[in-house]
Image (cartoon, grey):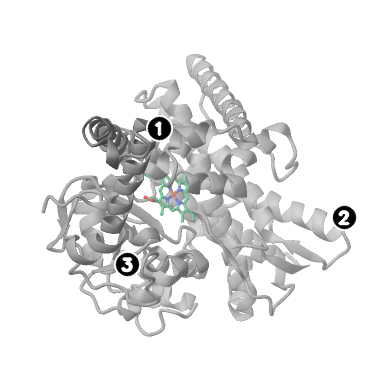
Amino acid sequence: MGMVGPTSFWSSYTFWTGSSIAASILAVNTVPQYTIGQSIAKTATAIFFAQWLVYLIYAVLLYPRYFSPLRHLPTVKEGNHPIMGQWFAIAGEPSGEPMRRWLNTVPNDGLVRYFGMFNRERVLLTSPKALAEVLNTKNYEFQRPQFLLRGIMRILGVGLLLSEGDDHKYQRKGLTPAFAFRHIKELYPVFWSKSREMVKTIEEVELVQKKPNVEAEIGGWASRAALDIIGVGGMGQDFNSLADPNTELNKTYRSVFSPSRQAQILGLLQFFIPAWIVENLPIKRNGDIMAASKLARDTSFQLVRQKKEQMARKEQLHPDIISIALESGQFTDEKLVDNMMTFLAAGHETTASSLTWAAYMLSKHPEVQTRLRQEVHEHIPSLNNEINDTLIDGMPYLHAVCQEVLRFYSPVPVTLREAVINTSIQGHYVPKGSVIMLCPWAINRSEELWGPDAGEFNPDRWMKPGTANSGGATSNYAFLTFLHGPRGCIGQKFATAEMACLVAALVGKFEFEQTYPDEEIIIKGGITARPKNGMRLNLKVVEW
Ligand code: HEM
């Protein structure tokens, strides 16, 4: 049971170095004829690499096959490379896509094993019971892997997303009331006014300033609208990025929160090189991002100060999430700022992705688009009308379409956890350090959970009697888009209300179709799944 897992290898440079030097000193003094030129340095280097090679053979070839306690789990055979396992499928396909296949093709009772780079083991959860155990019952036994988070932590600080253990419990408890529906409902008018601004600006820029009916890239608009909404609704700061995406503040936020290719490479490097080295590489981005993140934090501190002054003057604060958390008195200024940064990171690209996919699905299914437009026009006679939560939530087809888009194209296709102690899932022993994969992209389209039409886009599954909240699935774990439990998305109600407003405004204002209907949509990897070349649509204004 106490088998040394290969993960410990990555943290054992010190041990290898120490033992190589000790062995080489011993060898040079006792059996110099067997050393390299009787040099301690050269011999130590040779021993270091020899040990490394032996360990590599053990960790990559022998451990997963003969020693790992996970070796009895059903294991993916497809495309198995002797050293890289299923890594080529994982790297070559959109994230979550191979897992979707394996979930349906490998017979299993809730856990499936596959291999990543250098045969590192991954455990994919496939059943509601296994998911419930990891996400709820044993939630604190499985954490987000630290090696992924260090880089982000420097930028965001330790807000809700990156906190663990008691710190997480405290922050989650303190922030939960701010995300309660009684507060979110006050934000519906904010979501609506930004949605209205989005479609009016699209009309002005794409159809008036440019010549009509040219292609409009909706992903960029979605991103700007989502940034503005999380700014106003999350912290009471209007970035005005719909009106002007090029202000200093907007450029700053975009550079911090939309990681460039170079950043992704740096992130990848951290798998191989200790994070502190990567962080200090004199690469432009390292400097840029720290400066930008400092500016973003300074701006956030300023906002907190303003809000406190307002409170001291007994003025009513804006109903944004951070103001409510501030009024609760449970957070220091620093923690409020950490959470502002966190909301920007967690609630910006995710929402932008959901609106982009909604536009895509509606353009592919014109009959759904027309039906939805009719419902929106019936309930909201004009774009200039004001709305409230009852009006938006009173449109069943709007709800159905949004849920189906979130099911079909979960903005976060895959996420992971690491066992922090030796534990078990569904009775299978899971040693400390095991990496557990949670894959909305796979679960959300599992035929076992959704029925034989799981792979079809069908909003009507949310329209049958009693299915508005389940989509007709057999378990609520079948819809994994926001995960579940104490580490599930705290912003779910915020996000779904925001999406409903954005989709209603888009479909109410425009008829649209894909500019290149035969284009194969390539999905960009990263934390959120989005079309690589954006979503190009032809728009036509409709009477509203
Ligand atoms: C469609 C939009 C969204 C989707 C699909 C989404 C999805 C998710 C998922 C899957 C997680 C869990 C990640 C993991 O454990 O690896 C998460 C966590 C989180 N989300 Fe969202 N999210 C969305 C919008 C938002 C918004 C708008 C906010 C803020 C206003 C937000 C705030 C958070 C926070 C703070 C966490 C961390 C929760 C914790 O660890 O306790 N999200 N989200």
- Mark 2 and ligand 1: say if the CB distance to the nearest ligand atom is below 8 Å: no
Residue assigned mark 2: 209
Q: Nearer the viewer, residue 4 or 42?
A: 42
Count residues near mark 1 (Cα–Cα under 10 Å), then give few for <14, some for 14-19, many for 20+.
Answer: many
Q: In the image, is residue 51 above or below residue 541?
A: above
- According to the picture, the residue beneath numbered tag 3 turns out to be 114
Contact (Cβ within 8 Å) of mark 3 with mark 1: no
Residue type at mark 2: give it.
Gln
Does label 2 or label 3 sit earlier along the sequence? 3
Nearer-N-terminus badge (2/1) = 1
Q: Of the residues shown, which amino acid type is indicated by label 3?
A: Tyr
Label whose residue precedes the other's in the sequence (3 or 1): 3
Q: Secondary structure at mark 2?
A: helix
Where residue 149 sits, quadrant-wise, is top left
| Whole-percent x, y for residue 428 in the image | 14, 63
Q: Name the residue beneath numbered marker 1.
A: 158
Q: Residue at x 75, y 53 (%)?
A: 200
Instruction: Identify which residue is drawn at 25% across, 37% down.
Output: 165
Residue 376 picture quarter: bottom right
| Location of residue 82 in the rendering, given as x and y in whole percent from the top left corner | 36, 69
> Gap between marks 3 and 1, in whole Å?
31 Å
Disc 2 crowd rating (10 Å Cα; few below 14, some 14-19, many 20+) is few
Residue drawn at x 82%, y 68% as measured from the top left: 213
Query: Three-letter amino acid code at disc 1?
Result: Val
Q: Secondary structure at mark 3?
A: strand
Foreground of the two, 204 or 269: 269
Q: Residue furthest bottom?
A: 452
Q: 232 or 332, which lies in front? A: 332
Q: Residue 485: in sight, yes or no?
A: no
